[in-house]
């Protein structure tokens, strides 16, 4: 067997591919889990399986496939996929602790492991206690976990570890701050959207939030794109954020009609389900695009310092 070829620049930066690959897989699996969770929520099948951690008395992993029909199929698939994401997160946390020299990233791995355990317990208690309020918390917390594993994927990427000249300018600082507030606003929008989905409440606040986010995305585009030659790594997430924003506006209209008006869609129930679920997924994707932009902008602005293998926040940038 031939020895693995290690790029010289990777060896110099200390970059290892497997933590990043596993973080990307975990992020993708979490996105799929949010998709299935959206189907469960919008079909009203969250209580299709009335017990936990068992499934109709069976070991969850041994439940017969022949009995997985209708709402049971949606809910049980959600549970199995959640267990898969939990296993990936455990593996990621162990791998980061074993090979990652940066304390911040190791800490994020432990935080992700704790978060996925909490999320699983929240989902189980929602069933055991038949608590609709916990369903809202469970849905909102899912996106916080999603953002956390996506951040780990960014921190473990080759581009993050590779040496690059920093542009400590007022422009990158302003971009970073606006992107940060946009990320916070997007998460707040997701929480409000969860309330709208589960209770039909706070639609007014959700619409106001959409207007604020729209302004933020437009301003970010005007600030980032003219200087893309100076900070090319900021252009990608900015373009993705703008494209997702336009798509989200269309999906929002469809989701609103599907939720609050008795309109017959051309494809019936399938399209009525597709609009709110796609709206949820696009919001999740916008959150990650904004988060990536935030992290990259602050790195450009000098907020992160890599010294002696330890990733820390720069004290000067925090002052």
Image: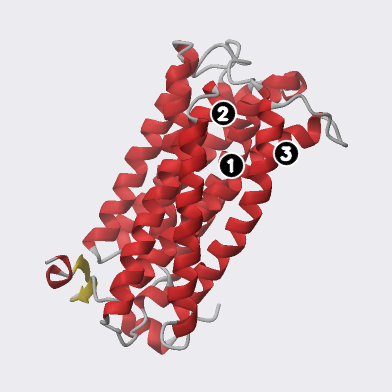
Q: Name the residue: 47% across, 29% down.
A: 202
Q: Is residue 212 above or below residue 42?
A: below
Q: How crowded is mark 1: few (under 14 residues within 10 Å), some or many (20 or more)?
A: many
Q: Distance between the residues labelled 1 and 3?
A: 10 Å
Residue nearest the observer in this picture, 197 or 47: 197
Residue at the disc numbered 3: 274
**Secondary structure at numbered mark 3:** helix
Residue 94: x percent and y percent?
A: 35, 51
Residue 108 position (above or below residue 44)? below
Q: Which of 20 and 148 is in front in this view?
A: 148
Residue shown at 53%/12% (left/top)?
Answer: 51
- The residue indicated by pointer 1 is 280
Label 2 environment density (alpha carbons within 10 Å; few <14, some 14–19, many ≥20): many
Q: Quadrant of the N terminus?
A: bottom right
Q: Classify mark 1: helix, strand or loop.
A: helix
The image quadrant of residue 113 is top left
- Mark 3 vs mark 2: which is more N-terminal? 2
Q: Mark 2 points at which residue?
A: 197
Q: Where is residue 284 in the image (x, y as percent from the top left)?
A: 53, 48
Classify residue 251 as left or right of residue 227: right
Q: Residue at x 58, y 41 (%)?
A: 280
User: Does residue 287 appear left or right of residue 173 in this picture?
Assistant: right
188 on left or right of 36: left
Residue 304 falls in image quadrant: bottom left
Q: Are marks 1 and 3 in contact (CB under 8 Å)?
A: no
Q: Which numbered disc flags the more N-terminal residue, 1 or 2?
A: 2
Q: Does residue 209 appear in the picture of this structure? A: yes
């Amino acid at each position: 067997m031939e020895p693995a070829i290690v790029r010289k620049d990777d060896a110099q930066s200390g970059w290892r591919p497997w933590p990043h690959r596993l973080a990307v897989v975990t992020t993708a699996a979490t996105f799929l889990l949010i998709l299935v969770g959206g189907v469960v929520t919008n079909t009203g099948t969250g209580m299709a399986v009335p017990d936990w951690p068992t499934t109709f008395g069976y070991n969850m992993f041994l439940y017969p496939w022949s009995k997985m029909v209708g709402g049971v199929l949606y809910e049980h698939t959600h549970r199995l996929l959640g267990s898969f994401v939990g296993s990936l997160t455990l593996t990621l946390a162990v791998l980061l602790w074993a090979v990652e020299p940066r304390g911040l990233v190791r800490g994020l791995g432990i935080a992700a492991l704790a978060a996925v355990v909490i999320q699983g317990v929240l989902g189980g208690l929602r069933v055991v206690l038949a608590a609709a309020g916990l369903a809202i918390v469970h849905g909102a917390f899912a996106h916080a976990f999603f953002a956390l594993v996506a951040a780990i994927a960014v921190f473990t990427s080759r581009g993050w570890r590779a040496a690059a000249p920093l542009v400590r300018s007022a422009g990158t600082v302003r971009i970073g701050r606006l992107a940060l507030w946009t990320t916070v606003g997007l998460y707040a929008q997701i929480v409000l959207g969860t309330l709208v989905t589960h209770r039909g409440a706070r639609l007014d606040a959700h619409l106001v939030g959409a207007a604020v986010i729209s302004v933020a995305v437009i301003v970010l585009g005007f600030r980032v794109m003219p200087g893309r030659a100076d900070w090319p790594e900021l252009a990608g997430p900015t373009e993705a954020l703008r494209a997702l924003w336009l798509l989200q506006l269309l999906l929002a209209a469809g989701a609103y009609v599907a939720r609050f008006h008795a309109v017959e869609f051309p494809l019936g129930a399938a399209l009525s389900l597709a609009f709110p679920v796609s709206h949820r997924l696009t919001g999740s994707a916008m959150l990650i695009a904004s988060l990536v932009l935030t992290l990259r902008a602050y790195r450009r602005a000098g907020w992160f310092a890599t010294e002696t293998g330890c990733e820390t926040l720069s004290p000067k940038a925090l002052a």
